[in-house]
Amino acid sequence: MGRGAMGVIYQAEDPAIGRTVAIKLVRADLLEGRDREVFLERFRREARAAGRCSHPNIVALYDFAIHEGNPFLAMEYIDGVGLGQALKRVGRFAPTEAVAIAVQVLDALAAAHALGIVHRDVKPANILVPPNGQVKVTDFGISRIDTSDITQDGTAVGTPSYMSPEQCRGESVDARADLFSVGTVLYELLSGTRAFNGRNATEVTYQLLTQQPRDLTEFVADIPDSLAAILRKALAKDREARFASAQEMASALRQAFDGLGGEQTEFSPVPAVFEPPAHETFDDAILDTVERRLASHIGPIARHLVREAARRSQSLEQLCESVAESIDKTAERRRFLADMLDGSARRTAVTSVRSAARNPPQTMAGAAPAVGFSDEQIARVERALTQHLGPIARLLVKRALPGSGSETALWDSLAAHIETPADRAVFLRQRPGG
């Protein structure tokens, strides 16, 4: 489903009540010694804080636990579009849409701030909008878990372009730091560009500390003065000059919304960008071709990456560009894209499809029986995979069984879920005969 530096997120089913959930596995094994103990304790504390944030505009946390030393979260599954993706599609939002989104984010923050919880990493990637238009803010509290914040005090936590000046300076923060971040998000929604945007973190930090964003009228000629004034106040370098609370900023935006001619009292816009896009149907032959060519660069994990990317890609070009990001070397990445997008890959796949149509596999009485796996074989591979992925291993094994023609194939397909080559090698060495 997704991955990050500190963990992996999977879509899963809760068998107890039959609901879809998101499982976030946090790789605590990346830390050692005292750092690991501090990390796990902070995880427990922050997860409890996130669990207290019950609000319609906050992604709900259902459960958390430690499995074999690795913490995981069971969260509300949101089938929505991240604002970062939305911005790439539309460039910028109409003022009424941008304000409606910001108000919902502020409502979520107000609920968290009332509990003494400061998000500290408000950014488009942490704001989701499902098709019904109801904004969901994610990573409350959990966003604070970061290796850079464990061993030293005063370390800045957040994403540079959206951080408050006090965060950049490594100072203590309060709720007004989140309001500054909302200001940067609203500015980006209105203008289509980041308020503070440099070639690297140093340039961005310098701008945050010393410069004002470009005037919004450069991007939106008829921006109302009231909305521009709200942004100036939210983006004040001195926290004392900002809004005193999320409620105060939301109230100001609601008044501005009325001035923009907005008529929605619930602030739940459903612009076309949030409607699920039409996906190109990729047949297995095309996916197999992409997988084989990608595997020559990154190994067996290619299968997992290709299948996941296919679910969210609208074209072969987008699919290839998505998985190409997993290739570290620039020259190899360009070679892969050139190889895939010059037409040869699609021709190869079409040829394979036609060949399969002329020579269909045996069915019914003539079909080879499915390979059966003993309970011992299943338990062995499940234990080995759990060491690397935690409790999600059982679900992955269950899904892989029907499509595996042998025990070797089963282990190979499951190895694709393990990100690092070293960990994959450790896993495969536990395979019988491995």
Image (cartoon, grey):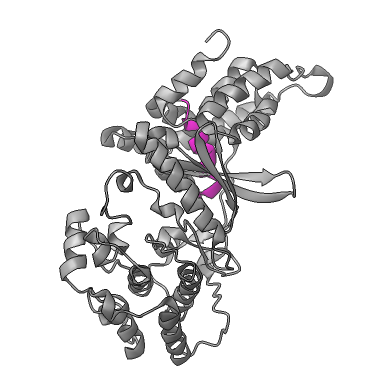
The count of marks equals 0
In the displayed structure, 336 sits above or below 82; it is above
Q: Is residue 332 left or right of residue 19?
A: left
Q: Main secondary structure of the magenta part?
A: helix
Q: Is residue 77 left or right of residue 207?
A: right
In the displayed structure, 43 sits above or below 403; it is below
Residue 334 rendering spot, x and y as whole percentages: 31, 37
Whether residue 6 is visible here, answered yes or no, is no
Q: Quadrant of residue 395?
A: top right
Viewer-closest of 433 and 121: 121
Residue found at the very far right of the displayed protein: 365
- For the point 64% across and 27% down, the residue is 356
Residue 34 rendering spot, x and y as whole percentages: 35, 35
Viewer-closest of 351 and 177: 177
Residue 244 rendering spot, x and y as whole percentages: 36, 80
In the rendered image, residue 313 lying in the magenta stretch gets the answer yes
Query: What segment is highlighted magenta in the picture?
Result: 300-314
Whether residue 8 is visible here, answered yes or no, is yes
In the rendered image, residue 94 lying in the magenta stretch gets the answer no
Residue 60 rendering spot, x and y as whole percentages: 58, 58
